[in-house]
């Protein structure tokens, strides 16, 4: 049985960008996101369909995806998080803070990413 994220709550996004190619470097090619879908050509807004039900939205300029929304919960989120997202986050710039609830509360972590440095901290309720 897969271990998935039940809830992803983004707390902070500050100038947070990841090279688009970073989402396509994992050996787990079966988990690579779909090619970007353009949602607004004038603003270069795109959406990446990830895992089974996950999406990442942002502005694509010069190969950098400036992210403005993560939807990272549901079926397949655990595999996508570990195989694709974590390595991509290591190539990021800017700051991300999010709280992740795994499997309905089995564990809760605070994810902080600052210029590619990742910190995962357990949260006790």
Image (tube, rainbow, N blue to C red):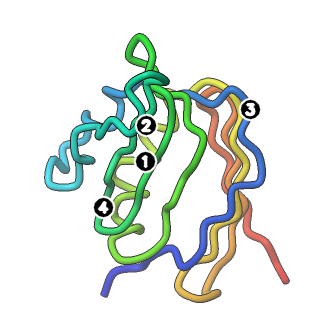
Secondary structure under badge 2?
Answer: helix
Mark 2 or mark 3: which comes first in sequence?
3
Whether residue 116 is situated above or below residue 10 in the rendered picture: above
The answer to whether marks 1 and 2 mark residues whose Cβ atoms lie closer than 8 Å is yes
**Residue 27 versus residue 6 in the image, above or below:** above
Sooner in the amino-acid sequence: mark 3 or mark 4: 3
- Residue pictured at 35% horizontal, 77% vertical: 75
Give the label on residue 88, or none: 2
The number of numbered discs placed on residues in the rendered structure image is: 4
SS assignment at label 1: helix
Left or right: where does residue 8 sit relative to residue 20? right
Q: Determine contact: label 3, label 4, CB under 8 Å.
A: no
Residue marked by disc 1: 85
Q: Which residue shows up at 14% across the image and 54% down it?
A: 30
Cβ atoms under marks 2 and 3 closer than 8 Å: no
Residue 119 x, y percent position in the rendering? 68, 47
Quick one: label 1, few (<14), some, or many (20+) residues within 10 Å? many
| Residue assigned mark 4 | 51
What residue lies at 73% left-to-right and 48% top-to-bottom? 97
Q: Secondary structure at mark 4?
A: loop
Q: Residues within 10 Å of mark 2 (few under 14, many from 20)?
A: many
Of the residues under marks 4 and 1, which one precedes in the sequence?
4
């Amino acid at each position: 049985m897969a271990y998935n994220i039940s809830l992803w709550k983004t707390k902070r996004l500050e100038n947070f960008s990841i090279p688009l190619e970073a989402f396509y470097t994992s050996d787990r090619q079966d988990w690579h996101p779909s090619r970007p879908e353009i949602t607004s050509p004038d603003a270069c807004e795109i959406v990446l369909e990830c895992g089974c039900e996950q999406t990442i939205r942002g502005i694509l300029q010069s190969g950098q995806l400036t992210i403005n929304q993560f939807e990272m919960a549901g079926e397949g989120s655990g595999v996508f998080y570990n195989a694709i997202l974590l390595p991509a986050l290591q190539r990021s710039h800017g700051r991300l803070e999010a709280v992740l609830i795994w499997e309905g509360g089995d564990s809760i972590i605070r994810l902080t990413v600052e210029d590619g440095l990742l910190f995962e901290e357990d949260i006790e309720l």
